[in-house]
Image (spheres, rainbow, N blue to C red):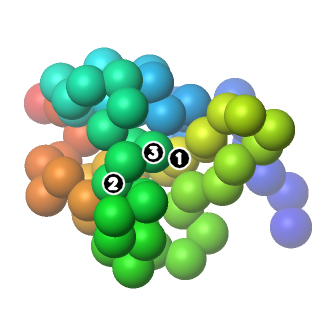
């Protein structure tokens, strides 16, 4: 399976929070409080950084990707 890391659907948690208009800690706190809201494979921690997908943000916030309006 080949993963394209240049894809706009993969971002760090702070960028995702900014795009969806949330606080910079939104993703981390949301995952800590309710990890079951995140679809399997849509969030991962690398060292101290969280990486999240568009799918995860749409699932957690209930808001479609604001970049695609």
Q: Nearer the viewer, residue 39 or 67?
A: 39
Q: Quadrant of residue 49?
A: top right
Q: Nearer the viewer, residue 63 or 29?
A: 29
For label 3, the SS is helix
- Residue at 85% from the left image edge and 57% from the top image edge: 2
Q: Is residue 59 left or right of residue 44?
A: left
Q: Nearer the viewer, residue 3 or 51?
A: 51
Of the residues under marks 1 and 3, which one precedes in the sequence? 3
The x, y position of residue 5, in whole percent, is 74, 36
Asked if the residues shown at circle 1 and circle 3 are in contact, with their CB atoms under 8 angstroms apart, the answer is: no
User: At 42% across and 59% down in the image, what residue appears?
Assistant: 31
Give the crowd class for mark 2: few <14, some 14-19, many >=20 residues within 10 Å: some
Q: Position of residue 32 (x, y in %)?
A: 43, 60
Which residue does the numbered mark 3 point to in the structure image? 28
Tell me whether the residue at label 3 lies in contact with that at label 2, contact meaning CB atoms closer than 8 angstroms. yes
Which residue sits at x=55%, y=33%? 11
Question: The residue tagged with tag 2: helix, strand or loop?
Answer: helix
Q: Are marks 1 and 2 in contact (CB under 8 Å)?
A: no
Label 1 sits on a secondary structure element that is strand
Q: Quadrant of the N terminus?
A: bottom right
Q: Quadrant of the C terminus?
A: top left
50 vs 63, nearest the viewer: 50
The numbered dot on residue 68 is: none
Task: Say which residue label 1 marks.
Answer: 52
Label 2 belongs to which residue?
30
Q: Tell me: residue 46, above or below residue 13.
A: below
Determine the residue positioned at 81% across, 38% down.
47
């Amino acid at each position: 399976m080949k993963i394209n890391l240049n894809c706009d659907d993969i971002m760090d948690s702070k960028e995702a929070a900014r795009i969806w208009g949330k606080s910079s800690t939104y993703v981390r706190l949301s995952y800590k409080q309710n990890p079951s809201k995140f679809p399997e494979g849509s969030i991962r921690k690398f060292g101290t950084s969280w990486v999240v997908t568009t799918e995860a943000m749409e699932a957690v916030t209930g808001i479609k990707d604001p970049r695609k309006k």
